[in-house]
Amino acid sequence: MFLMLPLLPPAQLSARVPVSPAPIVSPQPTNQETLPLQESVPPQEFVEAQEIRALPGKLDDVPVFNSNSPEVVLTEGILLSTFPSAGMRVPSAHLNYAFNGRFDIFAHHISRASNPNQTRSLFQGIVIYNPNDRPVQVDISQAATYLTRPDALFIDLPPHVEDPVGTVFAGPGSRVVGDILRGRRQTNLPTAMIIPPKQAQMLMNLPIPAGTVTPTSNGRSTLMRLFSQAPVYVATLAMFAPLNPNRTERVPTIEEWLNLLVNAGVAGPRDIPPTPPNSKTTNITYGRVAGVSKGSEWKAQITDNRKDYLSIPSPGHAFSYGLSTLEQGTFATGQIQSAPMLVRYPDTAYLANGNYATHYNLTLPLRNTTRQAQTVSISIETPIKQDRSRNELVFLNPPDPRIFFRGTVRLRYLDERSIPKTRFIHLVQRRGQKGSSLLNLTLPPSTTRSVEVDFLYPPDATPPQVLTVRTLSNFIGR
């Protein structure tokens, strides 16, 4: 038996119950899961003929504790445990994977009242255990966690909003990745933990209140960047708030969390199992992720073959690079960017489709090889997912009412006066929506100017998207 978890003295615990900050954005909220629909107009497909390219670069090797199944949690239990199974009542609920060095924690779960009388808060706990014979320090360089209500309501936002100070977001996933992109951290989360040998501590112990008014569901998104000096195990758990004698709620103790970890099975209800890879069916179920995925960042210098620059398209033409492409959605490039799973529960996704919270860090050294000044436009777009042609993008007019992307993109570049610029733009795109220009940059003849486009792929989004580079027919400066 390697576990002595239930015997931990309270003095050695670091459980915290921070209160999430009040929301910054104040527009009137809409339904949590569905934004107002446009008037019913039959959409018409239209095709943009252009080259679609595989995205250069690759995912790094950083392991990600990736907890997203079940998304809606109605019964308490283990959301994801990488602990060894020895000594556990339900061995199959533990994946036996130790984190050592740099790793991430991503979690996204929803509490929903199954009936009007179910008002107890669902708590989410994250436990880190030190199996070693010496203390281990775990550093948390960045951390953010938000509820839908009241922290980050799903509000109706324009498709394109400049956001220099980070006050524009819709949903907890959008707000979390925006904070991490800006290098922020919430001060109510720890910056470091020193865990004694053979003991555990609480990294997070926070509620997801379901509420008693419509909508009765509430979500919490969490993202953390960590570094451990020695192997540690991690688990995220769900427990309904224990009650005091007067029937008021209280915060679970670490002893209660560890008892749940040792004795419980996986939380429920379970999500729909995924379709096995390479299936012939066109009605594919990707599944939700619960396991350890491989890759925290996709970094790429996008250039021509054997060149140190990217030649811009000829005037009036464009090319695109797939973003977060996945099986049956590669735009015929054959490139599946979904992070592989190092360990997973057998009823959850085979790959981390969507690459939620993955940092796409893309540099485009744009070169005008012509003898005339040209203006280049850069955009992110959400065409219809397809795998039949890498020479066309299919859009809808009007776009499908369903939102497929909402999150912040950062642009860094030198303007026409060689002054460094950094811009943050919050995007909302619906299925089949052609993206507006993020940047119009005029390049003199035979010059190169680099543009860095980066974002963390937001939870609540649906892949794939594309990054489009277009040379305008009639150039205009910006």
Image (cartoon, rainbow, N blue to C red):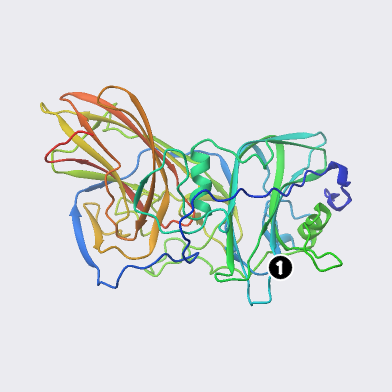
Secondary structure of residue under mark 1: loop
Label count reads 1
Position of residue 296 relative to residue 48, above or below, is above
Position of residue 390 relative to residue 302, above or below, is below
Image x and y of residue 37, in percent: 36, 68
Q: Neighbour class for label 1 at 10 Å: few (<14), some, many (≥20)?
A: many
Indicate left or right for 231 with 443 as reference.
right
Q: Is residue 65 visible?
A: no
Q: Picture quarter containing residue 261?
A: bottom right
Image x and y of residue 307, in percent: 27, 27
Three-letter amino acid code at disc 1? Arg
Image x and y of residue 1, in percent: 85, 51
Nearer to the camera, 85 or 291 = 291
Position of residue 137 relative to residue 460, above or below, is above
Q: Picture quarter containing residue 203?
A: top right
Indicate left or right for 41 with 137 as reference.
left
**Residue drawn at (39%, 69%) of the image:** 281
Q: Is residue 315 visible?
A: yes
Q: Quadrant of the C terminus?
A: top left
**Residue drawn at (36%, 47%) of the image:** 161
Indicate left or right for 231 with 428 as reference.
right
Nearer to the camera, 57 or 39 = 39
Residue that sits furthest to the top in the current view:
418
Indicate left or right for 103 with 398 as reference.
right
**Residue drawn at (50%, 55%) of the image:** 171
Image x and y of residue 259, in percent: 81, 58
Q: Label 1 belongs to which residue?
A: 120
